[in-house]
């Protein structure tokens, strides 16, 4: 079973691999597709990321006719609290935001949330998706390459 930091197990019906999560591809409500397509055009990793994530959240809520609140909470991890109708995000990860929003749509079904978020991300951010590496169903950023040039020494 995959583990989180501090040795806590990840529980739920998670897909066993990324292939299981993205195949067959999912279909989405057209309003949601248009929302995420517009969000992708904003270059979500540039500028005020928090404001962009809130705009995405509000537009997805409108598209689906649901009203969970969303906030950022450092150190809490990312999760959806169904009793409070609250999405808490620890990072500005687009996949994580989509994943937790999928919980607001469909409850605690982890397979659905993973499939929904990875398929939506792959559809609208194909280059970024192609750069990810996976451990089971978990999407991980590739290591950041150093921009520092190595010193050259002429002999």
Image: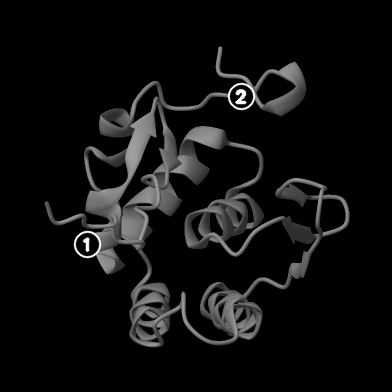
Residue at 66% across, 71% down: 66
Q: Quadrant of the N terminus?
A: top right
Q: Residue at x 29, y 65 (%)?
A: 125
Tell me: 12 left or right of 86: left
Name the outermost residue toward the left.
155
Residue at (37% x, 86% y) in the render = 38
The image quarter containing residue 50 is bottom right
Direction from residue 83 to residue 71 in the image, left or right: left
Give residue 88's quadrant in the image.
bottom right
Name the residue located 73 percent from the left edge and 17 percent from the top edge.
7
Q: Nearer the viewer, residue 121 or 91?
A: 91
Q: From the image, tell me which residue sits under label 1.
A: 127
Q: Position of residue 80 (x, y in %)?
A: 73, 50
On the image, numbered disc 2 is attached to which residue? Answer: 12
Q: Label 1, label 2: how many angstroms apart (C-alpha)?
A: 29 Å
Report the side of 155 relative to 133 (left or right): left
Task: Say how many tags the image has.
Answer: 2
The 10 Å Cα crowd at callout 1, few under 14, some 14 to 19, many 20 or more, is few
Residue 137 in the figure: left or right of residue 70 = left
Say which element carries label 1.
Answer: helix
Where is residue 14? Give x, y as percent: 50, 27
Q: Quadrant of residue 2?
A: top right
């Amino acid at each position: 079973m995959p583990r989180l930091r501090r040795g806590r197990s990840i529980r739920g019906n998670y897909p066993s691999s990324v292939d299981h999560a993205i195949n067959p591809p999912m279909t989405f409500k057209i309003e949601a597709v248009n929302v995420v397509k517009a969000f992708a055009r904003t270059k979500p990793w540039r500028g005020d990321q928090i404001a962009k994530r809130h705009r995405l959240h509000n537009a997805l809520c409108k598209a689906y006719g649901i009203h969970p609140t969303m906030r950022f909470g450092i150190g809490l991890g990312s999760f959806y609290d169904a009793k409070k109708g609250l999405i808490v995000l620890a990072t500005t990860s687009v996949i994580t935001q989509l994943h937790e929003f999928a919980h607001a749509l469909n409850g605690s079904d982890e397979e659905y949330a993973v499939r929904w978020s990875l398929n939506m991300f792959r559809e609208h951010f194909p280059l970024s998706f192609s750069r990810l590496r996976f451990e089971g169903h978990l999407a991980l950023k590739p290591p950041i390459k150093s921009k520092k040039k190595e010193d050259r020494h002429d002999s």
